[in-house]
Amino acid sequence: MNILIRILNLLLMTFVLNASLFMSEINVWIRVGAILAAGIYFLIYNIFPALKRYPSIRLKVLGDGAELLLTFFVTTIASLPLAAAGLVGTINGRLDIPVYVFYCVIFAVGELILFWNGIIRVYLTSVQLGIRYRVLGIVLGFVPIANLVMLMIIYVKVRRECGHELALDKLDKSRAADRICATKYPILLVHGVFFRDSKLLNYWGRVPAELEKNGAVIYYGEQQSASSVSDSAKELAERIEKIVKETGCEKVNIIAHSKGGLDSRYAISKLGGGKYVASLTTINTPHRGCIFAEYLLGKAPEKLVRTIENTYNAAFRKLGDPNPDFMAAVKNLTNSFCEEFNREVLNVEEVMYQSFGSKSARARSGRFPLNVSYPVVKKFDGDNDGLVALTSAEWGEKFTPLYPTGNRGITHADVIDLNREDFKGFDVREFYVQTVAELKSKGY
């Protein structure tokens, strides 16, 4: 249906252009009627460019925007020969100059409407374009030829985004009755260091919503953004006990990212949380610490470290942390701390422990600052995700390294959907759905 609409639109556009160019040869009422009909169609098409259903308003606006951009591209290319023919006709005296100018004005206005209608819809609703492609689109928009190339790049990315979302929606609907993520115990998502649980910008990106679609009950750790492992664990232990007592769920399944995994282990082992936790799944947690962090702490000027510490603590107090402690958090990520930590914080037999780890393929795999930190971590710790070495992420009964296809790799931010980015070889939402579904199958 979409292809038919595109072809119909192109044919009607071509008819209008021909009618404008050679109107002297057509009866005036036919010309007026044809142009009026084409104008009405053009208006309707700009409001409803595609007769396709989407699972959300955002995707509908995005998909329609992509259709408008494709129409702009096709009609612009297809109209060039007509414009050239009109110019030749004007030079040979077979076409009046006012007629040709009228054609050019109608063409330009129509194409501008198509373009801006499409690009505004896409820019406002696309998740995958990001800042990079939005900026490139604006900059190259004023460069002939390059602007059309950039337009097609944007179109392809947007169509892939729509296609991926439609495929995922179809998958969710096909398994909705199975509620594959409806675990016996609710899921507690525990964030890593230097972030807070926020309703405005979810640390876990699109993951929680996808899990809930498939039957999961979700809670958040809500510990401070930066503090020592013991202090964060205390907050976490209180949070777990509160959830259990208020809901009567008996236990929770913890999925923790980065330092959140260390906080969770301490809460389970040292603060009595083990009786309230059925399983702990850690994602890219530095269980053996970071050698590079220890090196940087030893080499960085003390004045610089104190400045960063004071600035961070002051900023996050304003954001809601009662007592943020930047340095305590950083020191608890070092290799020497984690060696001692692992000797003292032992696994609780009643809790099932498992872990996942990933690695970047190169510095360019991640966004700032992970693209900068990757080569540093690589030098000291080996294969890493931009912050945590793959060998440091292993803990528990089962360790699963994530090796996607392609040359991108999976960064520390990718595993929690921080950038809301889809890329070949790793579907972050489906990764969590399958992880939670496995917990359900095991009776957790």
Image (spheres, rainbow, N blue to C red):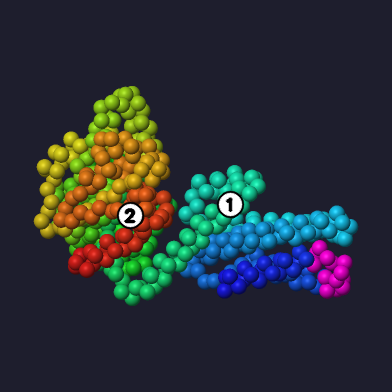
Asked whether residue 94 is in view, the answer is yes
Q: First in sequence: mark 1 or mark 2?
A: 1
Residue 149 badge? 1
Using residue 311 as the reference point, say whether residue 233 is left or right of it: left
**Total of numbered circles in the picture?**
2
- Dominant SS of magenta comes to helix
Name the spot of residue 249 as percent of width and height, x first. 22, 64
Instruction: Answer with the quarter of the image where residue 28 lies.
Output: bottom right
Whole-percent x, y for residue 393 in the image: 23, 47
Q: Name which quarter of the figure residue 254 lies in.
A: bottom left
**In what element is the residue under mark 1?**
helix
Q: At 23% across and 67% down in the image, what residue appears?
A: 440
Residue 404's tag is 2
- Taking 291 as reference, is 146 above or below it? below
Residue 20 among those drawn in magenta: yes
Query: Residue at point 31% right, 26% down?
Result: 300
Q: Give the spatial CA distance, label 1 vs label 2.
A: 29 Å
Which one is nearer the viewer's eye here, 79 or 137? Answer: 79
- Region of the chain picked out in magenta, as a range: 19-31
Q: Residue at x 61, y 52 (%)?
A: 148
